[in-house]
Amino acid sequence: MPVMGAMELRSFVLLFVAIPYSLASVTVYSQIPLGQATQSASAATYTAPAAYDPTVLNPPPVPPSFSTQISLSVPATSDNVSLSQPLKGSFLGFSIEFSVISQVFGKNSSFIQVPFLNLMSNLRQRAGEVRIRVGGNTQETASLVDSLPNGDMALKEPSNLNDPTSTPALRYTADALYMLGNISSLVDVKWFLGIPFNDTTNLRLQIAEVGEAVLDSGGYLLGFQVGNEPDLYAAHGVRPSTYSPYDYFGEVGILVDAVNNDNSIPVKNNLVVPSVSGTWTPEDVFNTGIVTSYDNSLGYLAVEHYPTDNCYAQYGIGSPVDPQTVFPDYLNHTSATSLVAPYLNASSYAASVGKPFVMMETNTASCGGFPGISDSFGAAVWAVDFALQMGAVGFWGAMLHVGGQDDYYNPFTPPPTNQSSYHQWTVGSVFYSSLFIAEALGSSGTARLVDLTNALTSPSDTTTPPATSIYTPVYAIYENGAPARLVVFNFVTDTSGSSTVQFAFGLGGGNVPGSVQVKYLLAPSVSDKNNITWAGQTFGSTFESDGRFQGSPSITTISCSPSSNTCTVPLPAPCIALIFLTSSAYAESNPSSTVTFATTALTQTWNTATINPTVLATSNGMSGKERDQLASTSRENGAASMGTGIGVGLGLGLVGLGVGAWMGGAGTW
């Protein structure tokens, strides 16, 4: 493995390749009762962490006059179709709060969370790479230090009392960045990081200096975000009330000069601006001349946006929102098109100046999301539609935000640290969205999108789109000028089967193949959160995942009629169907095998270790007092360790694979 940085550090990640092995069990002497965490969000009767909230909402009724027969002529070439820019299967990545990296990634560069690696490996095998942004509010206050107690790589400090989101300050060590490098060497993750921007009179550029030394030589560094939601600085009390886009423009200039004068930052053109959230528009910042003035320093233009917020429930800010009332808003194509509408001009401008346009942070609702919505199958369907719509109108990529235990919307959540010896991870509904996008766009980097929803017709009227097309949107993905895949939705829930849609399509100017293969993203209802399957496989329910698929894959083959140029694919209510039009498109998106890992820090039914309950109570370095500090970055106050790991190296018939890196001045390991 090649050198990963100039700083002297030896790092070794001990993992095991998953092959057949015998299972055993952990012995727990009289389990200590778990303390009850308190929550202020939504469900008044539920007081444990939001990430495991069992709330299930009622699905909307079947829309009136819902058409179950729709048809479409797919252009056989891209000549007369307005296609997107080429897109990668890594389009829908993740935005992970800096303050929760110890929980999500691992204790340090030598102890990496294997379920996380497995999840990323599933994406990498389909998309070729994974994109992750590490940042959020906590990037603004992060400071690099030489070391921290107990071998930790990050530590939260008391929060800024003027900040209504109670974001904690953060200290971290260089080992955090070496951990990112080790993850990349295993599962090809590429990273956005954030330069702290809370004090531009005393800039802290160490994350760029060390980040480039560790990550850039492997091609794993995408860029550095300059400010997280600067349009909210005044509201959060971290800038004067008069803070404006021109003030931000001036502060970016200070950072640009500092980077240009820092010889420890060799790459000078990978900064990301303006990352506004909606209080300012991108145009408000572009109109300052920021792009033309700092063109040679900018790598990306970015925004951050959520459809709505749950901030009243979390912090008493804004107005209360009833999840049941707003749930239908997520369950039609209008949601996706209305969310991208404010950015059509900005995405066009970004293309004109040669900068990728990124949705740096999004999810179902800010301030942690909603119970019953953010972790539902409906959210998974919504996120796929939103991602495809962003791709269709000019976005380069998007990042689903990942918080902590106090958030409903997480794509994946490790168990509370005091339960990690007997619980596995929880994979949220929107992780399936990222997996779906990976297969829909594939790994070639040549996929180009078009939204064909308005071209849908019903048999009785072949000239007018059916009124119900907002519940059955259709996208086509072209590669090398020809259609390769179709994505078709059915947002409706109907357990009777009466709302199964028959989607008939042909190829304009050509003939359909003799058969097509179809993979379905399915659940019994848009409200369901425990029975989601992708092509027959699942990551299980709460506390049930080690990051590997469970079950056998199920791919449906549909016979078509080339002579009549017709192929009809059923769409159960609800579902999304990914239709592969060619064998090469199917092969590109479906790996014959996926590299996965089996953990050395094993849990109850995977472990032969005997652990005293006092160890369980403080496993991963956390006491009960500290545990409530491990939720999202919005709730915690006071200093708290961000978690450590308890490693139990076991043989158990596994074949050991040492995956490591010698990070020294020269040589390979």
Image: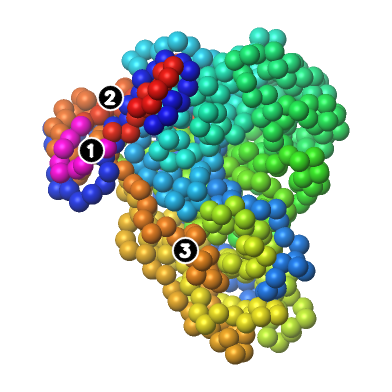
> How many angstroms separate mark 3 from mark 2 (CA)?
46 Å
Q: Which residue is drawn at 20% across and 32% down?
A: 649
Residue 540 horizontal side relative to residue 517, left or right: left
Question: What residue does disc 3 label?
Answer: 587
What's under tag 2, amino acid-wise? Thr
> How many angstroms separate mark 1 from mark 3 (CA)?
30 Å
Q: What stretch is highlighted in magenta?
A: 649-657
Front residue of 251/522: it is 251
Q: Residues within 10 Å of mark 2 (few under 14, many from 20)?
A: many
Question: What residue does disc 2 label?
Answer: 618
What's under tag 3, amino acid-wise? Ala
Front residue of 478/244: it is 478
Above or below, 467 against 343 in this view is below
User: What x and y, as percent, mark residue 452?
Assistant: 69, 68
* Secondary element at tag 3: helix
Sequence-wise, the earlier of marks 1 and 3 is: 3
Residue 166 in view, yes or no: no
| Image quadrant containing the N terminus | top left
Question: What residue does disc 1 label?
Answer: 656
User: What x and y, as percent, mark residue 281?
Assistant: 78, 38
Q: Main secondary structure of the magenta part?
A: loop
Q: Residue at x 37, y 64 (%)?
A: 553
> How many angstroms separate mark 2 from mark 1 (CA)?
28 Å
Residue 464 in view, yes or no: yes
